[in-house]
Each structure stands twice: as C-alpha cells, then as structure tokens.
Amino acid sequence: MTARPRGDLRYWLAAQRGPLIAAALFAAMFALFVTEHPAGLSANVVNTAANKGVLLAFVAIAQTLPVLTSGLDLSVGSVFVLANCVASTLVTGSPLEIALGVAAVLGCGLVCGALNGLVVVVGRLQPIIATLATGAIYGGVALWLRPTPGGAIDEDFADFVTGSAGGVVPVSLLVLIAAIVLVWIPYRRSVAGRAAYAIGSSEQAAYMSGVPVARSKFLAYMLAGLFAAIAGLLLTCVTYSGEANALLGGSYTLSSVAAVVVGGTSLYGGAGGAIGTIFGAFVLRTIGDLLFVFDIDALAQPLFLGVVLLVSVSLGSLRLLKVKKRLDLYR
C-alpha cells in the first residue's frame, strides 16, 4: 500500500476543512457542557443531548440536499411538523400497524419532497419561492390533521427510539448512522449525487456536459422530504404527541440553514455534505445546552441564539465573497 501524496492530503484537508472545524468545535463545546453539568458525563445526559442533536441533524441534512444544487428549501420545517402530526395519528396499535404507520410517515415526506421537486424542476420557479409556498400548504395540512395538540404514539416504540442500546449508545444516534450509511453514502456516490455537486458548481456547465440536471434536482428535493419526515417521526417519539406548530417549523428551518453553514456546506452549492452538517447541527444544539448550564436568562436565550445563527451564516458567506472561481475553495 502506498502512502497518500502530500498534495492529495493537503487537498483532502482543505476540502474537509468545514466538517473538521465543526467536529472540533463540537468536541470542545460538549466537553465544556458535561464538565459544567451537575450530572457530568452520564448516560442520561448523553442520551438527551443525542436525541436533541439528531432531531436537528435530520432536518439539516434535508436542507443540505437542495443547497448542494444551489437551492434552498424553506419547507423542511413544515414537512417536519406535518410528519409529526401524521406520526401522532398513525404510529400506534399492533406491530404491523406501527410498521405501516412509520411507512406512511416516510411516504408522506417523500411525497412532499417530490412535490417540491416538481414545482422547482417542471415549474422552473426559484426554489426559495416555490418551497415557501409549498411549506405553507404542508403547514395547512398539518393544522387540518391536528387542529389542537394531541394524538398518541406507541410508547414502547417511542421509548425504544429515544432510549439507549445496552444503556450506552443512544438509539437515535444509531438511526442517524443507519440513514447516512443506507441513504446518504449511496446517494453521494451515485450518478445523481455527483450530478448534484456539478449542478451546484455550475448548472449551465453541468447541462452542457450531459448531466441529468432535472432528475438530479428532483431526487435531491425528494430525499430532503424523506429526511425531514424521519425527523418528524423522531419528534413524535420524544414528545409522545403531535402539534401543528408553525413557530417550531420555522425555528427548525432557520436552524437547519445555520447548521449547513457551520458544517462547511456552501450556500452557493457544489461543496459540502451531510457529515459536516451533522456536526454543525450538534454544535448549535450544544450552544443551547451551554446557555442552560451557565444559567443564562431564559428570555435572553432566543436573542443569544439568533445572534449566533446570524454570525455563523455571515462568516460562512464572507469567505465566498472572496472566491473568484470554485477551485479557490480548496486552496
């Protein structure tokens, strides 16, 4: 086996700069959190932090897919809330009924994502406008399904998903890893996945090179709906209920964009990926935990988090203002 040339290693480190920085930042922040937490590094603390981080991570991955194609999906929060309402209605009963309910929730996400893809690709509308409109539709459907908070989910199923395997590893984290292995990695290595990066770099050049632009963009939005639906199912397992909460959906949409940027994905498309986004999501969730352990006034927490989100997005965009060509991102 030959060693990796220094030039290749330098290029790889430059390409992975965002995810590596996000991972290091998360490690430092989480170490500070468990040091200051009264319970320390306990299984319950780790499990609770994992459940909250994985929730945002799934929504942020959903945002990453359209962003790679130089788009932006403002409906991910609404799909997340809609899936929560569907899950609180269907995921209960016998094991077969639970399995069918889970399939219905995931199918709902795929349908929402497919509709987004059709509007963007066939309708040729700007993604930010198209998904703003479809997000309002999904929010309306969620409100129709769940006009008041309520519903139920099978408690054994919910406890399993939000619990720990062997009392050590959070199951939600295993679900996230499974989604990465079974969905993200095959997609990233597929023709459609590589095409998404080409489209984000230059849609015109990708089209002239024979890249299946329409099919790739459609698949990106459809998978975004799937990941948002997984997050909605996990939210139902955490809360044991459903609620058509527009504020919650909007908050997760905003946080998903910030997580994408913190994780090193370019808002201009063509660079980044789900791994960095996951660490970006955990960074944002750990910021909230740090505010809690340092006893920051609850009324000031939204203001502080808003400033952090604004700064993170601004810093991510600042470097792009200096980029004259895409290869400069890796120098």
Image (spheres, helix red, strand yellow):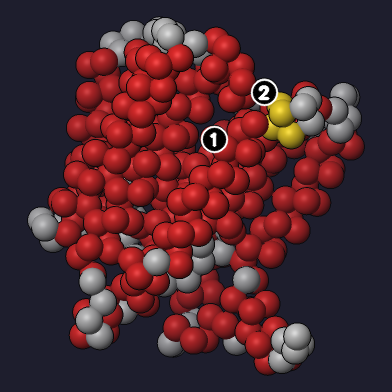
> What residue do we see at 48% from left, 75% from top?
320
Instruction: Classify 10 Å Cα crowding around label 1: few (below 14), some (14-19), many (20 and above).
Output: many
Residue 301, percent from left and from top: 63, 32
Instruction: Specify the label residue 298 is tagged with.
Output: none
The one nearer the camera, 159 or 331, is 159
Residue 257, percent from left and from top: 46, 51
Quadrant hosting residue 202: bottom left
Instruction: Specify the label residue 55 is tagged with.
Output: 1
- Which amino acid does the dot numbered 1 rest on? Leu
| Mark 1 vs mark 2: in front | 2
Is residue 292 rendered to the left or right of residue 315? right
Instruction: Classify 10 Å Cα crowding around label 2: few (below 14), some (14-19), many (20 and above).
Output: many
Is residue 212 rendered to the left or right of residue 199? left
Residue 232, percent from left and from top: 43, 29
User: Of callouts 1 and 2, which one flags the residue occurring earlier in the amino acid sequence?
Assistant: 1
The one nearer the camera, 47 or 138, is 47
Instruction: Look at the numbered disc 1 and give the secondary structure of its residue.
Output: helix
> What residue do we see at 48% from left, 20% from top?
236
> What residue do we see at 75% from left, 89% from top?
2
Residue under label 2: 163
Instruction: Look at the numbered disc 2 and give the secondary structure of its residue.
Output: loop
Quadrant hosting residue 147: top left
- Which amino acid does the dot numbered 2 rest on? Gly
Quick one: quadrant of the C terminus? bottom right
